[in-house]
Image (cartoon, coloured by chain):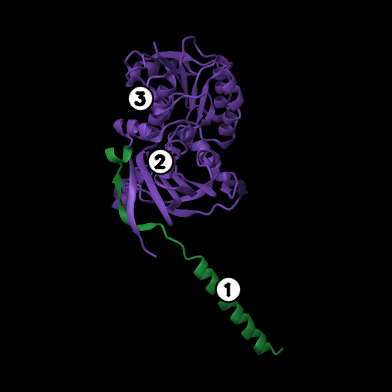
Chain colours: A green, B purple
Amino acid sequence: MKASQRALLVAAIAVAVSAVVRVRGKGPVPPTSGGWRELQGPDFR
Amino acid sequence: MTSVLVVGLGETGVRAARQLLDTPGVDRVTVAARSAPRARAVAQALHDGAESYVVDDEFAIPEGIDAVAAAVPPEADVALVRAAVDRGIPYASVGDDPAAVRALLDLDATARARGVRVVAGCGLAPGLSDVLVRHAGDLLDSVDEVHVARFGIGGPACAAVARRALREPNCEWRDGAFVHDRHRGDELIWFPDPVDARECALVATGVELLAESTPGVERVTARLGVPPARRIPTPSLVSPRSRSRALDASFGAMRAEVWGWRGPARDTVVYGVIERTAVAAGTVLGVATAWLAGALPEVGDGAPGASGLGTAVKPVPLLAELARRGVKAAVFEGVAIA
């Protein structure tokens, strides 16, 4: 196999792996925009 | 007559004694230290009839004590709890040194045999953090990840333990096992105002107690941030923002992030607390001790054995009691931005 073909194969595998990781790793993210509210009576029921 | 003994009169111990003196149902508070002048001075400063006691090398506990509150270094903590359990006296400790906490938990069988309750980690984190994690868990169907962070120290003794925790390998609970690692993984943690964002490193502090009090959890991490020992020299030489960060050195903060499932959706609950570290820890220790002495029966059932605070108490009554005393938790309400 020529070096250029080998490089193409490696690049294709890298793209495929990164796509899988990106899709599988796409979970919920923690709240990053908002504020703090003091716990009140209803929170203690 | 309900009598309690507070051993260790540093920043946290003194505040625990104050809370106990202010608790209806606690009739006598004895404050103990190794130094007689220190014990006498604290008893006089507290007023309200606090009595002083000098702790000897044998950690002998005076007669008529219904519960012990300990705010002492790790070695003394282990010796004192053994003396208390031998006498059948309930024991609450604010200590967070992992080895000392393990030593307290190892007394579970002995405590059960003697019909006495031992509660480890009755501070800000571990302690209040564990209770908030359980409270968050009650809002979710299941919990799989818990991440707790604390910024701040109670006093010099607490600082020494915290700095040691930052030097020692960290510990995570991962898939049913404790994983020790030297990797610190410093991360910026966002606490409520005025502490805001602080860099915190992974530590072993409190991980075992959180794993114990959260059945089925897959991952538990604990992070700790310690304010710099050096104070900013003069206000005129620093920017207003730097000044505010320097002046809040006694303030501490805690953040508990709990991940789990609510129905088919993955969800998170984030709680935080801002308070002077010694005040929060002392209040938690005081309330836990008052409960062990029988003065706050609604906080828990007091079944014998050794455990952390998160396992021992009912979250809602404890949080309500702490809020009534000024130690208030907050919940983060926000939206996820991918």
In the rendering, at what x and y percent does residue B36 appear?
Answer: 46, 15
- Give the mark toward the camera: 3 or 2: 2
Using the rendered view, name the quadrant where residue B233 is placed.
top left
Identify the residue at horizontal 58%, vertical 53% (top origin): B183
Closest to the observer: B317 or B287? B317
Q: Which residue is mark 2?
A: B135
In the rendered image, the quadrant that contains the C terminus of chain B is bottom left
In the rendering, at what x and y percent does residue B28 appear?
Answer: 38, 13
Number of marks in the image? Answer: 3
Q: Give the SS element for disc 3.
A: helix
In the rendered image, the quadrant that contains the N terminus of chain B is top left
Q: Give the SS element for disc 2.
A: helix
Identify the residue at horizontal 31%, vertical 34% (top origin): B323
Closest to the observer: B75 or B335? B335
In the rendering, at what x and y percent does residue B136 appear?
Answer: 41, 44
Q: In 3D space, how far apart are the residues under numbered discs 3 and 2 (Cα atoms)?
A: 23 Å
Q: Are marks 3 and 1 on the same chain?
A: no
Q: Please, which chain is the residue tagged with disc 1 on?
A: A
Q: Please, which chain is the residue tagged with disc 3 on?
A: B
Q: Quick check: B229 above or below A31?
A: above
Q: Which residue is mark 1?
A: A17
In this rendering, position of residue B59 left or right of residue B269: right
Q: Which residue is mark 3?
A: B19
Q: Amino acid at mark 2?
A: His
Q: Amino acid at mark 3?
A: Gln
Closest to the observer: B281 or B14? B281
